[in-house]
Image (cartoon, grey):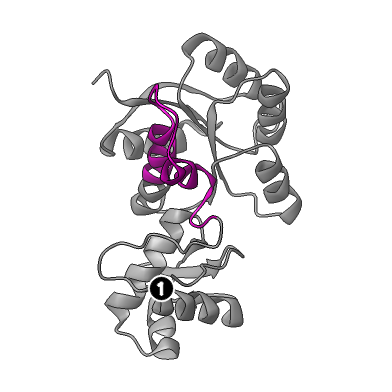
Amino acid sequence: MTDDLTVLVVDDDFMVAGIHTRFVDRTDGFRVVGQCATGAAALAEIERLGPDLVLLDVHLPDLSGIEVLRRLRAGGDDVGVIMVTAAREAETVRAAAAGGAAHYLVKPFEYDDLRGRLQAFATAHHALAGDRPPEQSDIDAVFGPAAAGRGPVLPKGLSAPTADAVLAALAAAGELSAAECADRVGLSRVTARRYLEHFVGRGWATVRLRYGSGRPERLYRSAGRGVPSQ
């Protein structure tokens, strides 16, 4: 569809790039228009294709993803960027934030992890897409979950006090599964996971997979952004 947001996938592992491409193409409103495996190729393809969004790995064989991001911004290119990488160093995360990356997703991850960030990016992108001056709600969609002391807009069925409690439990524990969070806050596991997945989608929490003998367990960690009460 012509209204889809276009995406360039940058990863030096062609199998991983293929997985990410399939994830994007499963998501309504998004369409992959190219793949590349080096920083230099990424810069060239961004200039040629003019995508709306780049899924950008940090570890590339020539330029790092952070250097690609810096060169884009230095050249005045404000293309949306989601860092998709195994790199978890605080310095790298800070550099991505300083370069204006929309989100930072740590590998390995499941489809829902990426879908939430894609949807958040689409919300922010479309908020400023019209010719009319944006309303305050449009601006808030770009700058984050709360502005000027207002609380976040939570999905139906989620409450701000419980959201505060879940985030506080994450901050205190460092890292929690949905079951552990449910026990600490006094929720059902299904309800706790709904809050946690919402936080991941909004960039307020991160998730990683812990592999064992059975199905991988999802472990959540606060991204350090409190959700103010409504």
Provide the residue span drawn in magenta: 118-147
Q: Is residue 96 above or below residue 130?
A: below
Residue 123 lies, in percent from the top left, at 38, 41
**Residue 22 in the image: x percent, y percent?**
32, 35
Residue at the top extreme of this rendering: 48
**Residue 214 seen from this side:** no
Q: Which residue is most to the right?
A: 91
Screen quadrant of the N terminus: top left
Q: Identify the residue shown where x is 38% and y is 63%.
A: 197
Residue 157 covered by magenta stretch? no
- In the image, is 85 to the left or to the right of 198? right
Task: Give me the residue at 52% from left, 69% from top.
Answer: 228
Nearest the viewer among 1 and 142 is 142
Quadrant of residue 198 in the image? Answer: bottom left
Pick whichever, 198 or 33, lies toward us: 198
Q: In the image, residue 140 lies at what x, y percent?
A: 48, 47
Give the tally of numbered discs.
1
Q: What's the residue type where badge 1 is placed? A: Ala
Of the pair 85 and 96, the residue shown nearer to us: 96
Q: What residue is pinned by disc 1?
A: 160
Magenta stretch prevailing secondary structure: helix
Q: Residue at x 43, y 84 (%)?
A: 180
For label 1, count other residues whose C-alpha is less than 10 Å away and answer few (under 14), some (14-19) or many (20+): some
Q: Position of residue 187 (x, y in %)?
A: 33, 85
Residue 168 drawn above or below residue 148: below
In magenta stretch: residue 127: yes
Q: Is residue 88 left or right of residue 158?
A: right
Q: Residue at x 43, y 41 (%)?
A: 138
